[in-house]
Image (spheres, grey):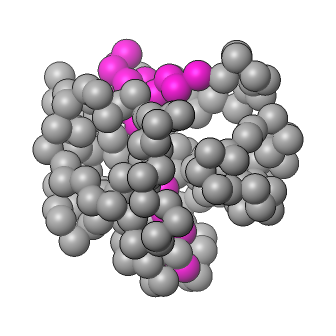
Amino acid sequence: MNLTIFNKAIEVEITAAEMERAKKFAAAVVGTVNYQDSNQSNTKKIQEDHFVSKLGEEAVRKIYERADFQVKGPDYAIYKGKQKSWAEDLYIDDIGMAVKTQKRSAANRFGLSWTFQCSQRRKDPILKDPLAWVCFVVFEDAANENCLVYPAKQIGTLQFRPPKLKRLVGKKQVVYAADF
């Protein structure tokens, strides 16, 4: 099944209820994660990343539901330790979809891009499946707090590059919007 149902970025409004749900999730999950292998120990940044990620998932969900797809997710459950998984963020008609979201303020600093975990200790399993689907999102934190959702792509069609931040080289791989 082809999950590319639109061919240009779509702006999606994020409601106050979705914002609140994402904030509560981020506050609850931050104490259950450990990103030391990514050189990330700033709990405020980790919490913000989880908040932004859920907003992206909500935006993608809305687009596919409006197109009459059955969507499962986002998942707001809090998992501890080994209960955590690398399962897809959404399931669209039972097909897994990863969602990667970047804040516009970060894009203005580093270029519009999305990161994937790719270290010796942890590697995003989606990178092993060229047919896996991913949807890229920008959270417009510097403007109206809506999301800009790009068309879904399959991992095998993407060009991965090293991150611009030297401390993340060897730990992350990056997809830059300029490459698609």
Q: Residue at x 35, y 31 (%)?
A: 126
Q: Residue at x 22, y 71 (%)?
A: 178
Considering only vertical position in the picture, is 72 above or below 175?
Answer: above
Task: Tell which of 129 and 23 is nearer to you.
Answer: 129
Can you give x and y, in whole percent of width and height, for residue 33 in the image?
75, 38
> Can residue 46 be seen in this snapshot?
yes
Q: Residue at x 18, y 65 (%)?
A: 179
Is 61 inside the magenta-drawn segment?
Answer: no
Considering only vertical position in the picture, is 97 above or below 87?
Answer: below
Can you give x and y, in whole percent of width and height, for residue 30 in the image?
80, 45
Can you give x and y, in whole percent of width and height, for residue 52 in the image?
61, 57
Residue range of the region highlighted in magenta in the rendering: 85-105
Is 94 inside the magenta-drawn segment?
Answer: yes
Question: Splitting the image into 4 quarters, where does residue 19 fall?
Answer: bottom right
Rendered-image quadrant of the C terminus: bottom left
> Can residue 71 be seen in this snapshot?
no
Q: Residue at x 37, y 16 (%)?
A: 94
Q: How many marks?
A: 0
Lateral position of residue 81 relative to residue 113, left or right: right
Lateral position of residue 143 relative to residue 117, left or right: right
Lateral position of residue 124 relative to residue 177, left or right: right
Can you give x and y, in whole percent of width and height, for residue 69 in the image?
35, 27
Task: Tell which of 92 and 85 is nearer to you.
Answer: 85
Considering only vertical position in the picture, is 68 above or below 104?
Answer: above
Lateral position of residue 122 relative to residue 35, left or right: left
Rendered-image quadrant of the N terminus: top left
